[in-house]
Amino acid sequence: MLRRSTTTLALVTTLALAACGGDDQSGDTRAATTTSAAATGDTQLALPLGLPAPPRLGALEEWDAMVADYATTGLSIARHPLTLLRGRLTGRGALTSAELERTAHGTKVSIGGLVVARQRPATANGVVFLLLEDEHGTVNVIVPPPVYDRDRLAVRAEPLVLAEGRLERHAAAGGAINVVARALRALEAPGRDAPVHALPAREEREDREAAGGDFRAVAPPAMSFAQGRRR
């Protein structure tokens, strides 16, 4: 029983390493390594029969590899989600957090990011604060109550969003940058017809196609602070 449990544990560990790219340096694809590990796992044969070679599988797409990283380790050191979305976002005029540093106060901007924090203080009169992260840094997004009411699902539930609004940079605040949002949309995974889409009414949420591919299921939960009574 001990030998069987040890073998099973080793197989589970091998499968986890293969899924998160632990054998990428060997040149094998994740899919091939995972299949090989599963085929040579805790299998006891009555006769010494040779196992067939695992099928040759292609390498994972960049987005799928990133999703696998988050699913197995909770992060990805090789690729940020926004890096993979950057080409299409740039084509639509979206800026990076680094480019916002060189943008004038009052400019209309759009910026995509991974939601790492949400804050809805009870004393803020319904204003929501988001902290978005892209491949260069973070930016604060202020969501006024009317925008929150209209784009509630994107604000509360989407891990990847595109915020459109106006840049604020006040000398009295030390030059800190905020984006006051006028709209928030969920970001799509690469390979779709459009990189963003407008969310439907809340009653249609269960029927809509998931934005961001499988990333929603594996995205790290955003930190939430001082939420008011009304969510």
Image (spheres, rainbow, N blue to C red):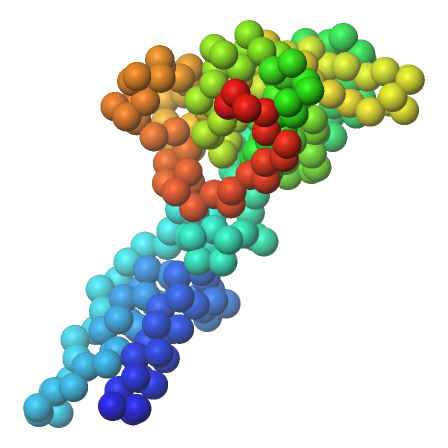
Residue 205: x percent and y percent? 32, 22
Residue 57: x percent and y percent? 28, 58
Q: Is residue 198 left or right of residue 91?
A: left
Q: Is residue 196 left or right of residue 99?
A: left
Q: Which of 70 and 200 lies nearest the eye of the viewer?
A: 200
Residue 48: x percent and y percent? 13, 92
- Please give the name of the residue rendered at 86% of the width and 15% of the height, measured from the top-left corner: 170
Residue most extreme to the left: 46
Q: Which of 78 and 117 lies nearest the eye of the viewer?
A: 117
User: Residue 21 lies in what quarter of the image?
Assistant: bottom left
How many marks do you count on the picture?
Answer: 0
Q: Which of 211 and 102 lies nearest the eye of the viewer?
A: 211
Q: Is residue 69 left or right of residue 203?
A: right
Residue most extreme to the front: 229
Q: Which of 76 and 1 lies nearest the eye of the viewer?
A: 1
Residue 149: x percent and y percent? 49, 12
Regarding residue 88, the answer to whether it shows in the image is: no
- Please give the name of the residue rendered at 26% of the width and 87% of the height, measured from the top-left corner: 4
Image quarter hosting the N terminus: bottom left
Above or below, comparing residue 205 to residue 60 in the picture? above
Above or below, comparing residue 55 to residue 94 in the picture? below
Regarding residue 215, the answer to whether it shows in the image is: yes
- Please give the name of the residue rendered at 46% of the width and 30% of the height, measured from the top-left corner: 158
- Please give the name of the residue rendered at 36% of the width and 22% of the height, measured from the top-left corner: 193
Above or below, comparing residue 56 to residue 210 in the picture? below
User: Residue 55 lies in what quarter of the image?
Assistant: bottom left
